[in-house]
Amino acid sequence: MSTAMNFGSKSFQPRPPDKGSFPLDHFGECKSFKEKFMKCLRDNNFENALCRNESKEYLECRMERQLMAQEPLEKLGFGDLIDGKSDKN
């Protein structure tokens, strides 16, 4: 009996995830927003609810620079933080 495994018998077709995969910020375009968010987390014992504004600003930066897909802020959980400006769909 052969101990060799036959990897060609089944064809696996990988596909990217629907969400959660986005380009890295290689040029540091949103670094200041990220640092502000991380500082807020450290200053607040990593209680992320206290840093929602910083998180929103960071995600807005990423969307504006096409480092992640455009999503309505309401869909990202920031609907209550929108201050009268139109949503970026």
Image (cartoon, rainbow, N blue to C red):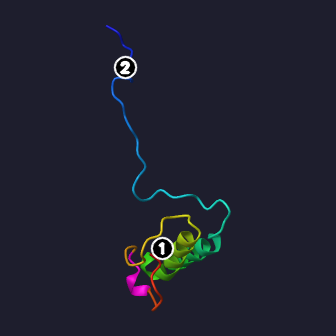
Q: Horizontally, is 64 left or right of 79 in the view?
A: right
The quarter of the image holding the N terminus is: top left
Q: Amino acid at mark 2?
A: Asn
What residue is shown with label 1?
46
Is 82 placed left or right of 23 in the picture? left
Q: Specify the segment rendered in magenta.
A: 77-81
Q: Residues within 10 Å of mark 2 (few under 14, many from 20)?
A: few
Question: The residue under label 1 is which amino acid type?
Answer: Phe
Which label is found at residue 6? 2
Question: Would you say residue 88 sits in the magenta stretch?
Answer: no
Q: Which mark is residue 56?
A: none
First-in-chain label (2 vs 1): 2
The residue depicted at 37 percent of the width and 34 percent of the height is: 12
Q: Residue at horizontal 48%, vertical 80%? A: 51
Q: Residue 69 at what x, y percent from top left?
A: 48, 65
The residue at the far top in this view is 1
- Tell me where residue 36 sits by quadrant: bottom right
Q: Residue at coordinates 45% horizontally, 92% vertically from top-left?
A: 84
Q: Provide the major secondary structure of the magenta segment.
A: helix
Q: Position of residue 17 (x, y in %)?
A: 40, 52
Determine contact: label 2, label 1, CB under 8 Å: no
